[in-house]
Image: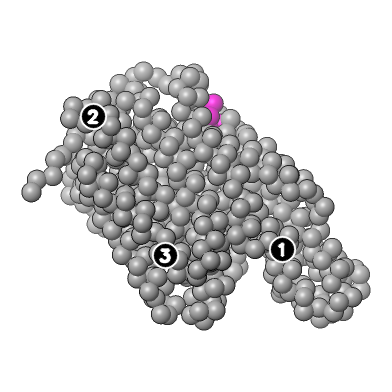
């Protein structure tokens, strides 16, 4: 334990940063289920709705790498407080918005605040707990809170919309943000890299541009097509900017993201595990939510309640990851967790039109447990390998891979779901000699079967409903098998790259020796 940093203040400081992290996770998904109410109130276009939902993650994902480097230089506590204040102010502006573009602007500013906040949470924990055993416990709690925030967003949003309005999705941020801000001001110590070189502004612009183009491309591809001109242009821009960023980092004396950090044992493997786990889990949750609402006909709040087993199991897995890594090494929770995630998606792949809901619950419990193991252990692997003075940029690598993996998972699994569902449903109706207008309604009606089939003649509804249920579960099987294959291949690829047995004591000595130096704020 560091001198001048007693046990009780450390715990309260950890509570403060985890509370801020919960607000960030909530904002990622809380607006999703409020879209119909938002449309009735402000009448945004389809494109404006898409931007209102996606702009937060777009700005967060693109700015987080540069923001992590800012925290190392400017101070992690200062970054945390500033990010939290920006999120709270932008939430207030969003709640008071009178037009769609005001909502979009507020979400963009919230994303910028979240980019400052997110890497600083892990970096502060790294500073608070330099001891490897305690750090693992803190990171397990961090991973559990991160999952709970994002995965309970739909439930919270559904309840708020049902009882208030879409504006409550913004107001809900203020009480926890205020508590986290006041607590952090009182107990979170400042830390920064005392030897930080000048900030690489050009590198920051290149990294932000490449990540923005990549996240935009994978987010928009289901709507614009994977081979559409805007999508291909965005992927090309992302590749070119990333190549320029890598070339610059190798050439300059003081890079934003030193290549040696990526080459450290555990950083690349941990980041890959986080990205691929996020690909599977968030894509799967997206598909499951569509199944619960569009096919089974549950309201957003009811559907959200039925997804709660997943974050509950994720929290259990995250808590179990620390002791497992301490006893068996990081390979066991990371590779084992990915294997468990694979098993969960194989359960989902067996879902049929008449399957009991217990199959979905089994999928959520198994997948959540595996994802929690991977999230906590892989995060600890990355943070444990990065020197303490670079904790901010290490945290940013962790956060950026999560964001890109999540966006790619939703985009890829969403595209597969759309393609297979439409093909199977229209094929079934065509083989049944259904009228052409019925086939067209199915082709363009989307996943919300219970909504668009009400416009059909009474005699046709039952047959269309049966065909749609069968088509959707067939499509969900394809997405689940894709996610299972990704998890299985990730486990196989990472198995030889992760250390077996207990973590090396040399690595622990290195971590402790490199813990960040506290810097006191002066008046």
Considering only order in the chain, which callout, 2 or 1, is on the residue closer to the N terminus? 2
Q: Which residue is mark 2?
A: 6
Residue span colored magenta: 331-335
Main SS of the magenta part reads helix
Residue at the image position 51 percent from the left and 38 percent from the top: 315
Image x and y of residue 192, in percent: 21, 41
Residue at the image position 36 percent from the left and 30 percent from the top: 135
Helix, strand or loop at mark 2 = loop
Q: Indicate which disc residue 170 carries.
A: 3
* Distance CA(mark 2)–CA(mark 3): 36 Å
Farthest front residue in view: 163
Considering only order in the chain, which callout, 3 or 1, is on the residue closer to the N terminus? 3
Q: Which residue is mark 1?
A: 297
Residue in front for this viewpoint, 486 or 56? 56
Q: Vertically, is 326 above or below 187?
A: above
Residue at the image position 15 percent from the left and 39 percent from the top: 519
Label 2, residues with CA under 10 Å away: few <14, some 14-19, many ≥20: few
For residue 200, side relative to residue 327 (left or right): left
Evaluate whether residue 496 shows in this view: no
């Amino acid at each position: 334990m560091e001198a001048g940093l007693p046990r009780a203040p450390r715990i309260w400081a950890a509570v403060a940063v985890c509370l801020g992290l919960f607000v960030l996770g909530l904002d990622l998904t809380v607006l999703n289920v409020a879209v119909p109410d938002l449309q009735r109130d402000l009448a945004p276009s389809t494109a404006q709705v898409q931007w209102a939902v996606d702009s937060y993650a777009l700005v967060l994902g693109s700015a987080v790498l540069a923001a992590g480097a800012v925290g190392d230089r400017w101070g992690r506590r200062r970054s945390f407080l500033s990010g939290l204040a920006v999120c709270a102010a932008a939430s207030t502006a969003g709640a008071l918005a009178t037009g769609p573009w005001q909502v979009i602007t507020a979400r963009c500013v919230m994303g910028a605040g979240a980019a400052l906040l997110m890497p600083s949470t892990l970096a502060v924990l790294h500073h608070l707990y330099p001891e490897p055993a305690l750090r693992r416990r803190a990171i397990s709690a961090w991973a559990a809170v991160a999952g709970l925030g994002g995965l309970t967003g739909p439930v919270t949003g559904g309840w708020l919309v049902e009882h208030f309005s879409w504006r409550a999705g913004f107001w809900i941020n203020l009480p926890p943000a205020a508590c986290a801000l006041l607590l952090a001001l009182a107990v979170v110590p400042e830390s920064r890299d005392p030897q930080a070189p000048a900030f690489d502004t050009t590198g920051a612009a290149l990294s932000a541009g490449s990540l923005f183009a990549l996240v935009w491309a994978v987010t928009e591809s289901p709507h614009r097509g994977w081979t559409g001109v805007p999508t291909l242009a965005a992927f090309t821009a992302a590749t070119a900017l990333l190549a320029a960023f890598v070339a610059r980092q190798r050439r300059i004396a003081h890079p934003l993201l030193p290549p040696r950090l990526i080459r450290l044992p555990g950083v690349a493997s941990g980041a890959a595990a986080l990205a691929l786990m996020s690909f599977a889990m968030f894509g799967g949750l997206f598909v499951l939510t569509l199944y619960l609402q569009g096919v089974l006909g549950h309201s957003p709040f009811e559907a959200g309640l039925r997804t709660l087993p997943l974050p509950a199991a994720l929290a259990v897995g995250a808590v179990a990851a620390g002791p497992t890594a301490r006893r068996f090494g990081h390979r066991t929770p990371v590779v084992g967790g990915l294997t468990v995630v694979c098993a969960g998606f194989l359960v989902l792949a067996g879902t049929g039109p008449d399957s009991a809901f217990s199959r979905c619950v089994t999928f959520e419990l198994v997948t959540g447990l595996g994802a929690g193991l991977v999230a906590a252990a892989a995060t600890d692997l990355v943070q444990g390998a990065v020197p303490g003075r670079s904790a901010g940029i290490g945290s940013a690598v962790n956060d950026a891979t999560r964001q890109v993996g999540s966006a790619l998972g939703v985009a890829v699994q969403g595209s597969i779901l759309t393609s297979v569902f439409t093909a199977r449903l229209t094929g079934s109706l065509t083989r049944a000699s259904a009228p052409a207008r019925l086939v067209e309604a199915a082709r363009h009606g989307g996943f919300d079967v219970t909504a668009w089939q009400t416009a059909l003649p009474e005699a046709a509804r039952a047959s269309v409903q049966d065909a749609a249920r069968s088509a959707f579960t067939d499509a969900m099987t394809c997405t689940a098998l894709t996610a299972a294959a990704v998890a299985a291949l990730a486990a196989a690829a990472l198995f030889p790259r992760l250390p077996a047995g207990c973590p090396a004591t040399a690595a622990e000595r290195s971590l402790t020796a490199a813990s960040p130096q506290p810097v006191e704020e002066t008046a």
